[in-house]
Image (cartoon, grey):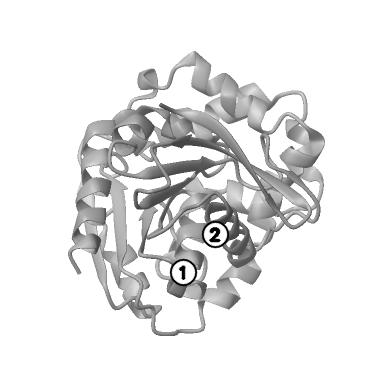
Amino acid sequence: MRRQLSVEVGSSRLSALAAGSPDQPAIVLLHGWPLCSAVWSPVIDVLGQEHFVLAFDLPGTGQSVGQPIPILKADIARTIIAGAEAAGARNMVVAGVDVGGMIAFAAARDFGDRLAGAVIMNTVVPGLDPWEALLANPQIWHFALHQIPGLPETLVSGRERSYFDFFLDALAGDKTKIGEAFRQACVEQYSTPEALRTGFDWYRAMPEDAKHNAVPRTIDTPILYLRGDADHRPIEPYLDGLRGAGASQLQGRTIAGSGELLSIEAPEPLAAALVEFTRELSCR
């Protein structure tokens, strides 16, 4: 049975949609931008049959509140891991999409001794190939816009639904699969000025994230990289980037029939991939 759960981490309160029992191995699910924790609703119940599932609101958005708000991806990873541990998570796999995938990489890179594994979905990790190539792609124009101090807040405030719908439609392989309730939930996730600023601050922090990640180190944490096939980008450059950053136990998989929103467009194949990965970890 899914339920809402909150935990205290320092002066902050983290909120998560939870399923399953803390006695089971944990899967921690992280949304990106302009997404919200409801992006995981189609897979939470099936994952909760074998796992303790925590789908967090990222700090500073939704019901996860308190100061200071971590912005660097490694700092967010530290906060999320502490929150999951406070909730009773063990044998933890951190899985994220978009910005959440950047955080999942940071968790594996910097806090791997506290994880069983990490899953990175449909994102490029700052500082790792093909980071520079994607930044030069005119279709990724919003990375530069969102890094300008104050401007995106001014442009988007009061127009969140139209702006977010543009990105949700662009991210999806089939935008008709994105329902009204989810679209509105994403708007509500960033409904305060602080939350809206936090989402853009994730982009403003990416240059510093890139510098941090560009320093190679051995990453022993098992990592699964997943991509939908709707954008027709090959998965190999992303895997090469992770290997170059030090990932020593890496596997990749492309899921057919989906864009970036795997949990909405292809929930059954995504859940199966996550369950298979966690079962492999338990056999090691």
For the residues labelled 1 and 2, say whether their Cβ atoms are less than 8 Å apart.
yes
CA neighbours of label 1 inside 10 A, class few (<14), some (14 to 19), many (20+):
some
Residue 114 marker:
1
Q: Give the residue displayed 31% in from the left and 38% down from the top.
A: 47
Quadrant of the image containing the C terminus: bottom left
Q: Is residue 94 left or right of residue 8?
A: left
Indicate the amino acid at tag 2. Answer: Ile
Q: Is residue 50 left or right of residue 70?
A: left
Task: Identify the element where label 1 is drawn.
Answer: helix
Quadrant of the image containing the N terminus: top left
Q: Out of 135 and 185, give the one closest to the viewer.
A: 185
Residue 32 is situated, as x and y percent measured from the top left of the image, at 53, 44
| Residue 154 makes an appearance in the image | no
Residue 44 is situated, as x and y percent measured from the top left of the image, at 38, 33
Q: Give the residue displayed 57% in from the left and 48% down from the top.
A: 141
| Residue 68 makes an appearance in the image | yes
Residue 22 marker:
none
Residue 81 marker:
2
User: Where 262 sits versus 282, above or below?
Assistant: above
User: Where 43 sits versus 284, above or below?
Assistant: above
Residue 146 is situated, as x and y percent measured from the top left of the image, at 67, 48
Residue 8 is situated, as x and y percent measured from the top left of the image, at 69, 49
